[in-house]
Image: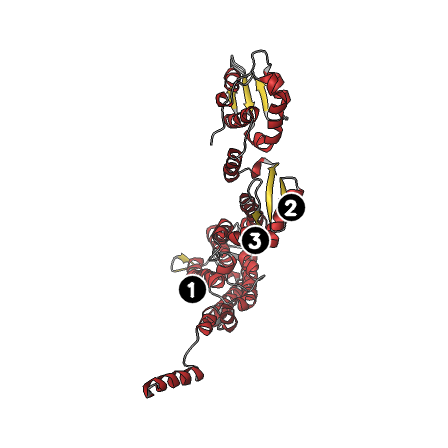
Amino acid sequence: MPSNDEESIASEKMRELENGKVVLPKQQNNENNGDEKTLEKGKFPTYHLVSELLLLIISVVSFSIILIRPDIFFDISMIGGYPLPIYTIKLWVFIVALPATAIALLNTYLYIFQLNPRYRSTIFIVRLLTIVSFATLPIPLWRPEGFSYDLHGALIALVIVIIYSLASNFVLRIFLLTNDKKVKHTLFKKAVAGSPSELEWRKYHTLSGYLAIFTGVIGIQFLWLIYHTIIRPIIIKNVKRRLVVNSLNFEEEVNLTTVALDLGISLEETIFILKQLQLKRDLTIEFSRYGAKLIEIRKAKWFSLVLQEKYDNYLSKQKLSAFELKANYFIELTEREKVKLQDFRRLMGFNDDFPSEDFTLYLPPGIAWIRKPLFSNHHYIFLSHDQALVRRDKIVKVFLENGEKMFEKVKSASKTPTSKK
């Protein structure tokens, strides 16, 4: 029989659970991850709204005073031996201009990083009215009568500085209006746990965030807009394509579900990427019920170091003839891009009566060509490694069909230069 103490402990826990004093793990996780609820309940930004309205009032009052009494700034009368404009401009700078600039910069930071997204539109409208108001401030001062040119220029420059501080990161403000997320989730995205490959493209979101802040400070934020809306999606698309292609194997089926999980993208997107590359004739792929098999790479830009290593491993498992080994050795020589013709013939072991020009004609176009550089006494053969990788099958076919013409009778496969492993 259980003791009375054990019964009382169990009943006490049940009472606490019923009264809501004990929080279940599931409930606690929901509270910790309730970012959306926090955004909805966010406090109204009283300081932000009041300070923005204050900037708007300052600009309207300053504009009205200058419009009604421009002589306050540009009266050539003297007080105590000093021109009146010196006093008025100093007063306006220390009481109005400097505080307005500081508040504008502070509120710009708060708008981007602290403001609840649901209140962005309200603050944005007030800031837009303030910018328009300050932009019209220099109009009555453009050609005043009886003024000092130095003071006039200083005042115009000061107004421009205020407008610049108000309009800093203005394009980013407009962009943030299009979504209801905080900037750290919009521009400073981090890789999702469990998908380490997302680091390959999520870093471009973070780069976009820093570029937005930097270009907003120096006033050329349209460059960030071009990067974020046009360049960044293209980069991410190319990175995803490269990762998907690198996950394939030559003549070996790969489960695309596993590939999608490793890369942190959907299976549909993985299949779409491969189908698109196949339709563009960049790759030759065989699809099966559960995966895909890489048959041929038709464009050199997809022949990365990862796939090169996979292809070398694939070749090492194949039983190659002597002429196929010769073809692979030639493809390795193309990495040098430029070889003296005499040395090239010696390395390849061509027959003495076999012309080098015939060899370049046998090959597909754009792989090898013979030239004599200016101020040189020797002929060189120029090679394209990228084209050789792409047209490997055709090169092997050329060596198989014309090997007896190009080479001496192969005595043994052991004497034939072999490919590097």
Q: Quadrant of the N terminus?
A: bottom left
The CA distance from mark 2 to mark 3 is 18 Å
Q: Nearer the viewer, residue 34 or 11?
A: 11
Residue type (three-letter) at the residue carrying disc 1 = Ile
Pointer 2 residue: 276
**Crowding at mark 2 (Cα within 10 Å: few <14, some 14-19, many 20+):** few
Up/down of 189 relative to 243, above or below? below
Q: Secondary structure at mark 1?
A: helix
- Say which residue label 1 marks: 95
Residue under pointer 3:
257
Question: Is residue 159 depicted above or below 359 in this figure?
Answer: below
Q: For this view, does 159 lie left or right of residue 276? A: left
For marks 3 and 1, the one nearer the N-term is 1
Residue 146's spot in the image, x, y percent? 51, 54
Depth order, front residue of 233/216: 233
Separation (CA) of disc 1 from disc 2 = 63 Å
Left or right of residue 318: residue 77: left
Q: Amino acid at mark 3?
A: Thr
Residue occupying the point 38% across, 83% down: 10
Q: Residue at x 62, y 20 (%)?
A: 402
Question: Which residue is outermost to the front?
Answer: 1
Which badge, 2 or 3, comes first in the chain's sequence? Answer: 3
Q: Which is closer to the viewer, label 1 or label 2? A: 2
Q: CA distance from mark 3 to mark 1?
A: 65 Å
